[in-house]
Image (spheres, grey):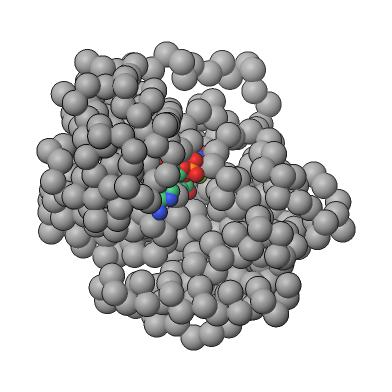
Amino acid sequence: MRRVIIVGATGSIGRQAIDVVARHADRFSIAGLSAHSDEGGLLAAASRFRGAALCLSSRAPDSGAIAFHGPDGLRSLVRDTEADLVLNAAAGAAGLSVSFDALASGKDLALANKETIVMAGRLAFEAAGEAGRRILPVDSEHSAIFNMIERFGRDAVRGVVITASGGAFRDDPLESLPGKMPADALAHPTWSMGAKITVDSASMANKGLEVIEAARLFGLSGDRIDVVLHPESRVHSFIRTRDGSLYAQMSRPDMRIPILNALAWPESIDESVADMDPCDVFLRFSRPDPARYPLLRTAYEALASGEGATDAYNAANEVAVASFMGGAIRFTDIAVVVSRTLERAYPRTLEGLEAVLAVDGDARRVAASIVKEIA
Ligand code: NAD
Ligand code: MG
């Protein structure tokens, strides 16, 4: 029985993870659950599992059933609750400390929070190494690549090809993009996800973050990582092996598959909801248009500049997306804010979490001042 703590239990990934655990109750149990502000959602999730420690990370709860609260409460939940694995499904940079607390307290880390790897991937692997624990990617593309690399061996792999749906505006005329509203960006063609990552899919900042994530997770330079548009979201990524072959992982677009793989690793568990009939699918692949998705190239540039620049890429994009959602800037300004924030010089390497958070804070201030200029 693997005991699991889910951070971000009320979110898109968190709710699907709870479903996975409930469907495999013979394999997994819930040791702890946290949500940021949705107390009702947290209590509803907890009612399905007896004895789970609960945390509301934004404020003091109304219910006496919730033992932990606030940022310190979240740290205690992750560190002090007995468990084998933490699923970090918190949204955004706030998930960083969750990852390091999980590893430092000797737990495996199932990682949906890609920000951890983009901001501090090398440090996270150092922490995992010191603790003798694993980092198991949940992001569907990285789960696919991870599982293929585990089977083929790292030495057989020459590079990877990450697939992208293209997001909500894939087929719209370029001239229409500046006029897109937040509600338009939230209409994703194939995946149902949290708001921020759905906007990032429309701009392909999500793919930019995933290119950086893949580089750090699998030790690949940018020139070994390709991105292709794949509207059907059935191939979740490819690996290129030394003999020139491409291997793909395919499944229905259902995050419960990568979640289950991360929770169960290294075992395989039956999951029949996932069955896919190859006769049902028609697969298309093409190159993403750089004019439509400027944030993709910016991510490669940040990757080439080093750890400070990739940290700043994430921070600037979070500020820009929040500004777009709040109506302060246009959709196409998100890319402008990020690329202008990256015109500053950032350190090539970040030694320690303090340095990571310092660059994050600096980049947020720069991005916010650019937003003010534009707005
Ligand atoms: P979401 O917005 O649906 O849920 C976010 C969760 O995080 C909520 O439970 C919320 O309570 C919690 N949270 C918010 N702010 C927090 C804070 N400051 N401290 C602690 N917890 C906080 O987001 P999501 O779509 O589930 O995405 C979560 C993470 O998983 C993100 O990093 C995202 O990039 C990644 N991811 C999501 C998907 C997907 O299909 N949704 C796929 C791949 C990766
Ligand atoms: Mg993904």
Picture coordinates of residue 4, whole percent (x, y): 23, 33
Residue 246 in sight: no
Picture coordinates of residue 13, whole percent (x, y): 44, 36
Residue shown at 43% from the left, 72% from the top: 360
> As displayed, is residue 28 above or below residue 295?
above
> As displayed, is residue 251 above or below residue 173?
above
Residue shown at 56% from the left, 65% from the top: 319
Q: Nearer the viewer, residue 61 or 181?
A: 61
Picture coordinates of residue 139, whole percent (x, y): 44, 43
Q: Nearer the viewer, residue 45 or 90?
A: 45
Q: Nearer the viewer, residue 25 or 154?
A: 25
The part of the image, by quadrant, that contains residue 52 is top left
Residue shown at 54% from the left, 30% from the top: 253
Q: Quadrant of ligand 1?
A: top left
The quarter of the rendered structure image containing the C terminus is bottom right
Asked if residue 132 lies left or right of residue 258, the reply is: left
Residue 35 in sight: yes
* Numbered circles on residues, count: 0
Picture coordinates of residue 168, whole percent (x, y): 71, 43
The quarter of the rendered structure image containing the N terminus is top left
Find the residue positioned furthest to the bottom: 345
> As displayed, is residue 268 above or below residue 343?
above
Residue shown at 39% from the left, 46% from the top: 36
Q: Nearer the viewer, residue 298 or 25?
A: 25
